[in-house]
């Protein structure tokens, strides 16, 4: 069994502005003013047999965007993500399946000149993957 934990620092403040060119509107600038963030992650892997392994994980990802610059083009919410997976091998062939559920905290911004995009912002994601591999 393997248990891991790590912290991931993202220097979001370095990404101060984004620039865009539009075919019909010309150019645009998105001021982000995002704040740096530290993501916390934990994971567990357990080898049940020589051929079968399962994995579980969790991570906490705080939102880098302040309310003043929040918009739907660059979603930003504080997220709790839950992950799981299983793999089975037959000699050199390995089959893997994994799933992730990302539960984003709702952000409600009232209509005001202080906010870029008022409204209720929520993000929930379920992702599933299958993989087939061959080990040399």
Image (cartoon, helix red, strand yellow):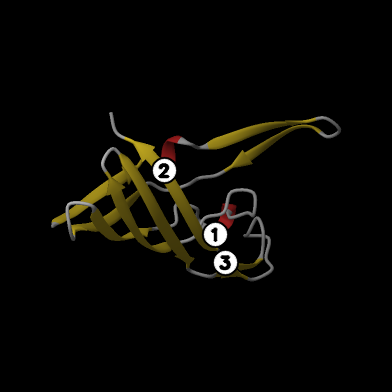
- In the image, 83: left or right of 33? left
Q: Nearer the viewer, mark 3 or mark 2?
A: 2
- State the SS at label 3: loop
Compared with 82, 4 (above or below) is above
Q: Residues within 10 Å of mark 2 (few under 14, many from 20)?
A: few
- In the image, 37: left or right of 46? right
Compared with 67, 93 (above or below) is above
Compared with 113, 15 (above or below) is above
Tell me the CA gap for discs 1 and 3: 13 Å
Query: Which residue is identified by label 2?
Result: 132
Task: Depth check: give the residue in front, 95 or 14.
Answer: 95
Residue 130 % position (x, y): 45, 50
Query: Which residue is identified by label 3?
Result: 122
Q: Is residue 26 visible?
A: yes
Query: Which residue is identified by label 1?
Result: 67
Task: Depth check: give the residue in front, 99 or 49.
Answer: 49
């Amino acid at each position: 069994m393997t248990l891991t934990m790590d912290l991931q620092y993202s220097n979001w403040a370095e990404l101060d502005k984004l620039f865009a060119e539009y075919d019909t509107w010309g150019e645009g600038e998105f001021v982000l003013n995002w704040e740096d963030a530290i993501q916390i992650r934990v994971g567990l892997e357990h080898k049940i047999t020589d051929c079968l392994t399962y994995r579980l994980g969790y991570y906490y990802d705080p939102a880098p965007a302040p309310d003043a610059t929040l918009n739907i083009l660059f979603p930003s919410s504080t997220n709790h993500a839950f992950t799981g997976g299983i793999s089975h091998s037959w000699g050199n062939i390995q089959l893997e399946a994994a799933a992730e559920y990302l539960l984003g905290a709702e952000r409600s911004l009232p209509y005001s000149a202080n906010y870029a995009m008022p409204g209720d912002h929520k993000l929930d994601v379920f992702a599933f993957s299958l993989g087939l591999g061959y080990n040399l």
